[in-house]
């Protein structure tokens, strides 16, 4: 009898082995959860945050949180700090006292990005900024 002609079924163990292998192969192509499913880690993007004059008042500006940063004017200097929680990559909220709060798991960060309450254990990174020739604030975001 030709082995291709007979009706071959899978037993329970063979079925789960096949299912496990297929799941591993499928997930190999999945986006990483650690970087929020975004572009591959290590990719650098320079974002034009607009005219530096738009950030004249001391404080935290939340315009670019979805792009990965807050703009901060502190003692006359323009800075950028990550808006991504170092615990599970959730977008942070700026609080009225200029601290940062993660609504996903409750981590909090001081105005200078230091962890004040976990579960996050790593401080928020400061991002490189520069002024473009047109007076715009440029922020280098590494994802």
Image (cartoon, grey):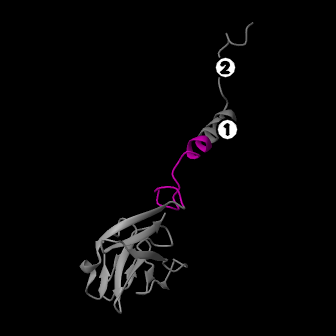
Q: Nearer the viewer, residue 82 or 138?
A: 138
* First to last magenta residue range: 23-41
Where is mark 1, residue-wise? 17
- Name the quarter where the N terminus is drawn: top right
Kind of element beneath mark 2: loop
C-alpha separation, residue under disc 2 versus residue under disc 1: 16 Å
Confirm whether residue 50 shows in the render.
Answer: yes
Quadrant in which residue 53 is drawn: bottom left
Where is mark 2, residue-wise? 8
Q: Nearer the viewer, residue 127 or 41?
A: 127
Magenta residue check for 29: yes
Kind of element beneath mark 1: helix
Q: Nearer the viewer, residue 75 or 135?
A: 135
At a point 41% along the width and 75% down the height, the residue shown is 130
Residue 103 x, y percent position in the rendering: 38, 73
Confirm whether residue 92 shows in the render.
Answer: no
Q: Is residue 42 above or below residue 65?
A: above
Mark 2 or mark 1: which comes first in sequence?
A: 2
Main secondary structure along the magenta-highlighted residues: loop
- Residue closest to the far top: 1
Q: Is residue 42 above or below residue 20?
A: below
Quadrant in which residue 13 is drawn: top right
Residue 46 x, y percent position in the rendering: 41, 65
Q: Is residue 85 left or right of residue 24?
A: left
């Amino acid at each position: 009898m030709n082995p291709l002609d007979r009706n071959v079924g899978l037993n329970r163990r063979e079925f789960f082995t096949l299912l496990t292998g297929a799941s591993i192969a499928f997930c190999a192509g999945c986006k990483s959860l650690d970087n929020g499913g975004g572009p591959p880690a290590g990719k650098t993007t320079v974002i034009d945050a607009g005219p530096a004059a738009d950030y004249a008042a001391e404080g935290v500006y939340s315009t670019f949180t979805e792009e990965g940063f807050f703009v901060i004017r502190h003692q006359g200097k323009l800075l950028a700090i990550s808006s991504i929680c170092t615990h599970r990559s959730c977008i942070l909220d700026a609080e009225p006292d200029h601290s940062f709060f993660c609504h996903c798991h409750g981590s909090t960060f001081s105005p200078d990005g230091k962890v004040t309450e976990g579960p996050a254990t790593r401080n928020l990174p400061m991002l490189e900024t520069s002024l473009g020739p047109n007076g715009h604030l440029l922020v280098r975001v590494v994802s």
